[in-house]
Image (cartoon, grey):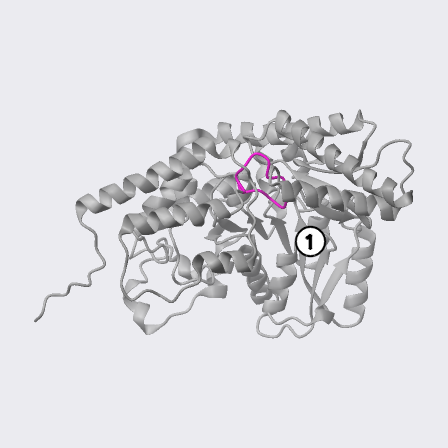
Amino acid sequence: MKKNLASLELSEEEMKTYGHQVMNAIVTHFKTQNSELPVAMGSREEMDSLFLEEAPEKGSTPIDVLNFVLENVMTKSTNLSHPRTYAFVPGPSNFVSVMADALATGYNIFSGGWAASPAAAELEIITIQWLLKMFGLPQKKGGGIFTSGGSMANLTALTTARRIKCGEDFSKAMIYLSDQAHSSNIKAIRVLGFKKEQIRIIPTDIEFKFSINKLKNCIAKDRLKGLQPFCLIATSGTTNTGTVDQLQELAKICKKEDIWFHIDGAYGAAAILSKKGKQLMKGIEKADSLTVDPHKWFFQPYEMGCLLVRNHKHLSHTFTEKPEYLRDIEGNTSEINFYDHGIQLTRRFRALKFYMSIKTFGLKQFRDAITYNIDLAEEVEKILRTSKTWEVVFPATMAIINFRYNPIGKKYNQKELDALNQFISEKVVASREALLVTTLLHGQVVLRMCLINPRTTIDDIKETLVLCRKFAHEHELKRQKVVH
């Protein structure tokens, strides 16, 4: 038979050269990223001009392709690990986890079943155990699974809740969440086939927490209508303000009403490692299921979400299928096949980066980093409150601070303030010097900083505020010209 020349391989020397260049690029990125501009911009037309082509029939040299990617792809993506990336929820990665991801991908480990990769499955079991202990969930009875992110963790949780509480018929099932719950929950509910009428969005109070009285009234009315309240979604760390719902009180309601208690802690749950965060997290141990995103405040690279559950059997009872082609690899009951605990059959080895970074740095460094982030936001609040130009709209909460430019004596009306702060955000982003965007609180356009990057300094914040004031003055000059 003719020898196959299409093995998709490089020589040993080529692999070493290629690998060294990739490694050098990553190390250089980590070393220099703080001094680079964080924001990347590019129109579809600009991107098409760079990349649009037919798939090539003949290849190029590996180094040429790599250099093209380093020059045109990596430099044209916003750096969410940059200390001046304040928007959304930043992704402050760490080098050890990046290398762990390279190992997992390089060895191409399948992390779905025990038989294929017992060590990978064991590390997922162990790291899940670490997290269960961290959040006060039962370690023997409890369980969990690593997912691509919080969206998939929430979908997995709600699928499990529906199966356990409703069985096959969920036509009368009702689900409750606040108006500050993350949009991924609504998306998950829609994916699961619930109708709009089965979703109860409960208004929040002035502190953006669940209105307990309105929730109780809503549940009572639904029961009187013959409906089935089956799941409540609380939030430990809302994206807008970092607010933590009244977890203990909500847990009592769920227990009394026999409702599945899901906590979406994708953003804030990791704060339990700090003293201030632990105070806010009281009641988190009462959850039936809990979403955590290690690629946020546990400083892991994308993608890495996690779902923890009070009873691991709830996952296997929801997701286990027995196709004939898997019949020889079932193993015994202690050998967990994670494809039986979630939606994915094919799974990458996500546990490795979490394991290696915790082993390398130790939990204390993670605790200290999270504590630093919370203290930094509180320091920013102090600076804003002593300024004649800034107004704190919502106080520093779990490393998030909401504020707006509203100088004393200027007497701007609400519409003018909204336009001014929107202008500041747009100009800051356009400058590429920081990623600072707005959100809406009580109908007001406000600037929002999420400060979970341990490399962000108070000087970064001060210099960003100077930049904001510069653009505010620019807006004021334009306004004066229009008036005159």
> If the image is split into quadrants, where does the C terminus sit?
top right
Give the extent of the magenta segment: 80-91
Position of 311 with respect to 203 (left or right) is left
| Residue 94 visible in the shown view | yes
Residue 381: x %, y % from top left: 74, 30
Position of 3 with respect to 170 (left or right) is left
Secondary structure character of the magenta stretch overall: loop
Asked where in the image residue 195 lies, by quadrant, the reply is bottom right
Residue reaching furthest left? 1
The one nearer the camera, 245 or 327, is: 245
Secondary structure of the residue carrying tag 1 is loop
Write the residue at 51% across / 44% down: 294
- Disc 1 marks a residue whose amino acid type is Ala
The one nearer the camera, 483 or 319, is: 483
Task: Give above or below for 206 relative to 159.
Answer: above
Task: Give above or below for 344 relative to 439.
Answer: below
| Residue 242 visible in the shown view | no
Q: Is residue 328 magenta?
A: no
Residue 11: x %, y % from top left: 18, 49
Task: Give above or below for 345 relative to 104.
Answer: below
Write the residue at 47% across / 65% down: 319
Task: Give above or below for 299 relative to 143.
Answer: above
Position of 349 with respect to 116 (left or right) is right
> Circle 1: is it few (<14), some (14-19), or many (20+) Cα within 10 Å?
many
Residue 16: x %, y % from top left: 23, 42
> If the image is split into quadrants, where does the N terminus sit?
bottom left
Q: Which residue is mark 1?
A: 181
